[in-house]
Image: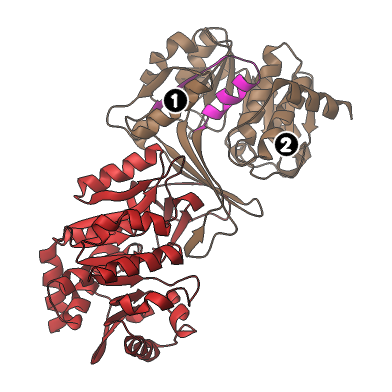
Chain colours: A red, B brown
Amino acid sequence: MVDVVVVGLVCRDIVMTVDELPASGSVPVGTRIETLGGAANQAVGARQLGLSAGLVGVVGQDTAADLVLDQARRDGIEVSGVVRREGGTTPLVVGVVEADATHRLLEHVPAEALLTPADVRAGAPIVGAARAVVADLQQPDDAVAETVRLGAAAGALVVLDGAPDDPDALADVWDGVSVLRADDDELAAYVGSVPEGTDAVVDAARELVARGPGVVALGAGQAGNVVAWRGGARVFPRLGEEPVDVTGGGDAFVAGLLRALLDGADPETAGWWASAAAALTVTRLGGRPDLDAEAVAREAERAAGR
Amino acid sequence: MVDVVVVGLVCRDIVMTVDELPASGSVPVGTRIETLGGAANQAVGARQLGLSAGLVGVVGQDTAADLVLDQARRDGIEVSGVVRREGGTTPLVVGVVEADATHRLLEHVPAEALLTPADVRAGAPIVGAARAVVADLQQPDDAVAETVRLGAAAGALVVLDGAPDDPDALADVWDGVSVLRADDDELAAYVGSVPEGTDAVVDAARELVARGPGVVALGAGQAGNVVAWRGGARVFPRLGEEPVDVTGGGDAFVAGLLRALLDGADPETAGWWASAAAALTVTRLGGRPDLDAEAVAREAERAAGR
């Protein structure tokens, strides 16, 4: 039994810095990082914040699979729910970050590395025993629906992260969603269009809470994030220093939110934890978080008190 | 004893296709290839054209080193001259190719993965016994100078590929250079500026032959390549179909040139072999060649006869 099970993309991340990407031709790379990435970063962040964590996902039978699974084990993450697909290729995300913090993610997720409902059911021993389950919508809608179903049936806090390909695909399991997280550009899938301005995002968050989830956390561009809950909503500004690389900010946000909610904190306090965890991640290169619960708590309290 | 020893970059190549690189954010990757790359592709090409080939270069002690050395061995390449640097990281080149064939190469070559003169001397058993030695100028000038010195002392055909960081760095070993190969943008290091127009490239090639090397092969933009030798020079147009990815065209060109010259062909014939080998490489994704001597010979004869 683990606190948090993340059901989603388990990949190899290669992050590289360049001064500026040329129109064509060669450019030298300054720093290169190669590690575990994808939705797995939510499990890494949860673990760093003192929760136990597990993964359900798909890797290949290549050397990259060894690399990411070894890293996950070193991170103390339960990987018995990760399928090693026969003949498959482990997904790879290459992040390119320019000196002005412009970032691009080149995502290679082979079709055979996507989760199926059967993969999710194979992970039922850990999904069904978790206190919280994160369903990553970068995976096919039917696998996500199966994840929500299993998590809800087990009484877990179910976090839906992202936007479905088909807005109707989750209708049957919508009642099982406890927390909805969507970035700025994913919001249109739920409310028909991208809301303009922070007030419109707050309205959208309140509307989504009225439709079911107890907590809704939405990206709100430069304004930061909006969290709404039954009886309230507020804007959480971006905390900390200027971002070096925004990759992983959303994953760390979810990890911080979960840590606080599983501790029994109210949604407003959880919003500050989430914002603090995101802030401490985006000042580093790559999507991998490097959190500790005390630092996040300190930053969350400082920000909430101001 | 091998026919061709390439002294230069031995790296892992990751090549990825995208429709179009976004200004920022995510983009799905269509095809991904991960294999041996760098100057090593010249050894691969030489081997495919029926020559025996060896490598002198530096890799790390990481899993990527196993990947590239295993591939080189499967290619039938002698790798006893490749140093596995203690604690080092194997170089990585990430190629990104858009649908309109625009290509970018992100080159991560850690300082410890550059060749030193001592590394080259350690490779002397194979460098000193080769019929031809290619010195890759993407490596430090002092290591390149040592390569030319060793190759010339052994009576090998010495190919200098690229441009030095310091134009004076090779003065002492210049007499040992048999063949000079430079791309369009590398030429300025030898003649002071990038020549404008094909006639100016031909003049530059003739001038360089007058300074020492018996054969000079220069990139000439859309016009193709120029090869000059004692007593002659000509433009070799780009052959074959529209390029998919120009990466590796120069390496295949060198492999084709070497195969013909080592066979005793005259420089003009060698220019056609080089052009044919390049043409058969750039219609494929990535820098790795897939040549066979009969196909190259056929294409070279066809092109020479027209």
Q: Is residue A56 above or below residue B242?
A: below
Q: Is residue A231 above or below residue A303?
A: below
Which mark lies nearer to you, 1 or 2? Answer: 1
Question: Residue B29 or B212: which is nearer the viewer?
Answer: B29
Identity of the residue drawn at 33% across and 60% down: A7
Q: Is residue B44 magenta?
A: yes
From the viewer's perspective, is B39 left or right of A72?
right
| Residue B85 screen position, x and y as percent | 32, 26
Q: Given the image, on which type of amino acid does mark 1 rest? A: Asp
Where does label 1 land, which residue? Answer: B70
| Residue A232 screen position, x and y as percent | 24, 91
Q: Quadrant of residue B143?
A: top left
Where does label 2 land, which residue? Answer: B201
From the viewer's perspective, is B138 left or right of B97?
left
Distance from label 1 to label 2 (Cα)? 40 Å
Q: Which residues, given as a range, are shown in magenta?
A: B37-58
Residue farthest to the right, as pictured: B306
Question: Residue B266 or B34: which is nearer the viewer?
Answer: B34
Q: Can the viewer see residue B31?
A: yes
Crowd class of label 2 (few under 14; some 14 to 19; many from 20; radius 10 Å) = many
- Marker disc for residue B194: none
Q: Is residue B260 magenta?
A: no
User: Could you tell me which chain the residue with mark 2 belongs to?
Assistant: B
Q: Given the image, on which type of amino acid does mark 2 rest? A: Val
User: Could you tell me which chain the residue with mark 1 belongs to?
Assistant: B
**Helix, strand or loop status at disc 2:** helix
From the viewer's perspective, is A266 left or right of B57?
left
Q: Quadrant of the C terminus of chain B?
A: top right
Crowd class of label 1 (few under 14; some 14 to 19; many from 20; radius 10 Å) = some
Identity of the residue drawn at 33% across and 82% down: A223
